[in-house]
Every structure is written in structure tokens, then in C-alpha cells.
Image (cartoon, rainbow, N blue to C red):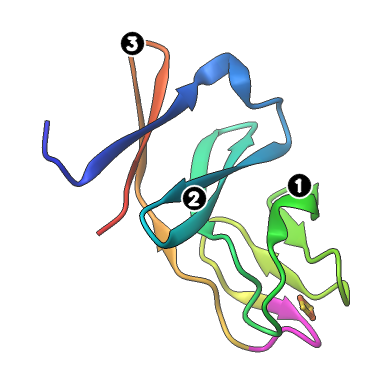
Amino acid sequence: MSDDWKLVCKVEDIEMEDLIRFDHDDKTFCVYRLEDGFYATDGICTHEAVHLEEGLVMDSEIECPMHQGIFDIKSGKAVSPPACDDLKTYPVKVENEEVYININ
Ligand code: FES
């Protein structure tokens, strides 16, 4: 396994239609569990420096807790203002009931 893959948690640690925060070095991420799998984005909203960990997951979108900007979790695309810049997304895989994120 490449060093780029970082262990986040066990599958059962993330509720369906929810997310957890994952920090590594000086970066922070959100890792989501949706009906069809796991996804990851940058943790900080692109509108202002607010973490999305307290945001609301609705279908495959995340609503920022600060000004309710909305992003598509799978593409990172900003879909509702005031969010207008997209979030970066990251590959996620599951092995042996554990969730890994590729942070590069
Ligand atoms: S800080 Fe996220 S929408 Fe404003």
C-alpha cells in the first residue's frame, strides 16, 4: 500500500449520510459515508475558513454550517451560494472494513 493512503477509521465509525473530520499534518479533511460508498473533500469551506465537520449531509451534498453554502460531495462542486469555489476531493477506499483516504 502506498504511503499516500492514510487510515481514517473503521467503516462503522461513520454513520450513513454523515461525515467525520480527519486531520493529517497541517491539513484537514471531511470523510463522508453515502448510500453508495465513501467520499472525501477538503475540510474547510471555500467561502470562509469554517470547518465543514458540523455541516449537514443531505443526499450527496454538504451544507456549510456558517452561511449554508452547498457543495456536491462527490465532485466537490459548489452548487449553492455563497459558496462559489469548488472543494478539492480525494480518493477513498475500503479494505478489511477500514476506510483509507489518498491525500495526494
Ligand atoms: S463559510 Fe461556508 S458558506 Fe460561508
Q: Is residue 91 magenta?
A: no
Q: Could you tell me what secondary structure mostly forms the magenta stretch?
A: loop
Q: Residue furthest top?
A: 96
The range drawn in magenta is 79-84
Which residue corresponds to the image point at 48% horizontal and 49% vertical from the top-left? 23
Question: Mark 3–mark 2 contact, CB under 8 Å?
Answer: no
Mark 3 within 8 Å of ligand 1, using the beta carbon: no
Which of disc 2 and disc 3 is earlier in sequence?
Answer: 2
Residue occupied by mark 3: 96
Residue occupied by mark 2: 40
Q: Position of residue 24 (x, y in %)?
A: 39, 50
Which residue corresponds to the image point at 80% horizontal and 86% vertical from the top-left? 81
Disc 2 crowd rating (10 Å Cα; few below 14, some 14-19, many 20+) is many
Disc 1 crowd rating (10 Å Cα; few below 14, some 14-19, many 20+) is few
- The secondary structure type at the circle numbered 3 is loop
Q: Relative to the observer, which residue lies in front, 67 or 51?
A: 51
Q: In this view, does 5 lie above or below 46?
A: above
Which corner quadrant of the image does residue 44 belong to? Answer: bottom right
Question: Mark 1–mark 3 contact, CB under 8 Å?
Answer: no
Q: In which quarter of the image is the C terminus?
A: bottom left
Residue occupied by mark 1: 59
